[in-house]
Image (cartoon, coloured by chain):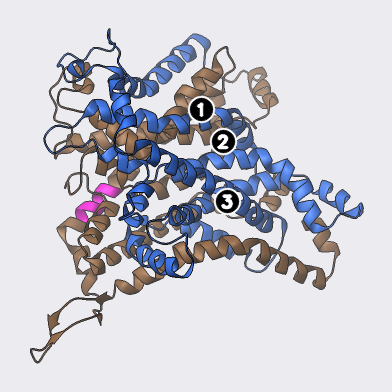
Chain colours: A blue, B brown
Amino acid sequence: MRRPVADVVAVVTAFVTFFPIYWMVLSALKPAGEIQSLDARPWTLAPTFEHFQRVLTGENFSRYFLNSLFVALTVVVLSALVAFLAAVAVTRFTFRFRTTVLIMFLVAQMVPVEALTIPLFFLIRDLGTAVPGVGLNTLGALVLVHLAFSLPFAIWMMRGFVAAVPEALEEAAMIDGAGRATILWRVIFPLVAPGLVATSVFSFITAWNDFIFARTFIISAKDNQTLPAALLVFFKPDENDWGGIMAASTLMTIPVLIFFIAVQRRLIAGLGGAIKD
Amino acid sequence: MSGAANRRRGPRERAGQSRLAALMLSPTLVVLALVVLYPLLSAVRESFYTSGETLDADGFVVEGERFAGLANYSGVLGERFVNALANTTLFTVATVSIEVVLGVLMALVMHRAFRGRGFLRASILIPWAVPTAVSGLMWRWIFQADGVANTIIGQQILWTTEGVQAKIAVIVADTWKTAPFVGLLVLAGLQIIAGEVYEAARVDGASAWQTFWRITLPLVRPALLVAVLFRMMDALRVFDLPYVLIGPRKHSVETLSALIWDEATRVHYGPASAYGTMLFLYIALIAFVFVKLLGADLLADVRTRRRVAS
């Protein structure tokens, strides 16, 4: 692309993609009277935090927020460890059912989650009687389910990162007398750590996005609800509280943004390695 | 531990590898078997059963689960299922193809070196990080009758009511949210194209257009294929965006996942499982055809591919 054309395209693209988010934050900051006014002005002269205040003080929002954060971060850590082990196994070892295992990971990505909510409900209920902490109304149940649904993509991405580690390094370590565990955790793990960080964004978003499972598994323990439930509070039969909805939505977006911007640079550089092959 | 070493060692070493591989895969396999495989199998089984009270041939009340054959699948021929299938397919084809074009464009824009690139990248990629429920609400707010979308285009369209405009609203919102995902994976692919390739093209006098079609696109193809495969599988399962943006049980935007969810919440467990099984088979079929036609190397051993490439 030639420079001036490309510059214009870049600015327009950035503007179009960013505008809806600007509109969301702006609506959260507009005073109640301005929000529903018919001429939608793209600025406000009297920004207010009244909506944010209402959201933060009412209906257990901060509690739900911490619950969501706990679930997402736990899923990120567990998923990184489990996916790392699995990715090393499918890229570095030759064994009989290797391709079958890879296809199974793809198949897990095809399962319509909505069709599984009822069997999952019974599974979690029964599991809860055997293993406390993962039953109905627990955050552990959400962690377990999101871990499962984030693993296939995480392993798929990690495969490339593991393959990018030169095999000569492992052979050198082996000649120096390093055992398998040492090679795994002291040689491969540090080298694929950037890849793990990149992959963790996907797991974080999967868990943070949750809409269905929280509504299915957390039925009576109000304290264990997560953020989507908090969003629904602002829907009223007569008049939706759009200021509150937009403020809550903004708050719900902030953690993903922080996480995302923090790892963004590594994400792009790292994914290059993952896709190389 | 490595492949090269493997060929030098004997069968005992390989048996050791298998055992170690099984050990390292076991956490993944246990979690997937428990949370994905077992519920999937029980949903498939359930799709052939019915429960509740009915009268048997002699007029007695019978209760509990009974084998129902294909009775739960009868709805598959019904108007509602066919409509949901058409909506799902339309959304998938429309969003994934627009996303490929926009995603490649975004990647090219993000790839250029200039001041403020970090800021530009962040603002292009941010929509992908916005939670789906939030983006559904945000677009619902934008698409209100007196919302900013109508103000900008100067029309009075009731976007969130039944009709073609609702489909357009869903496609716009979904494209906005997921084109950055395609852009991200393509950008990653762009970064590993060596600068010399472009240098050579320039020396040979290739136009920008030729460079794009003959060099850039073929070289980012693997990255693009991965992105499209995963996007298709996700798009075919789309549920929360139309649900939040337009609403539940809206004929013009009801997807298969939404239909399944609706049947399940009304305790029509048999039909819900039957539809779920059908959707699963549909996605599997499309993924299979895609991998067969376009990306035979998607499943190949990453190491052998690299050796062939170099």
List the residue tagged with mark 2: B220
Foreground residue, B255 or A221?
Answer: A221
The reply to whether discs 2 and 1 touch (Cβ–Cβ < 8 Å) is yes
Q: Position of residue A147 (x, y in %)?
A: 50, 53
Residue B253 location, quadrant: top left
Residue at point 49%, 9% (across, down) = A4
Quarter of the figure with the C terminus of chain A: top right
Seen at 73% across and 41% down, the residue is A191
Task: Tell me if label 3 and label 1 are in contact, CB under 8 Å.
Answer: no
- Quadrant assignment, res B29: bottom right
Sequence order check: which comes first, mark 2 or mark 1?
1
Amino acid under label 1?
Answer: Ala
- Circle 1 sits on which residue? B107
Percent position of residue B62, x then y? 16, 85
Q: Which mark is residue B39?
A: none
Residues drawn in magenta = B82-88
Residue A92 belongs to magenta span: no
Same chain for labels 2 and 1? Say yes or no. Answer: yes
- The residue singled out by tag 3 in the image is A78
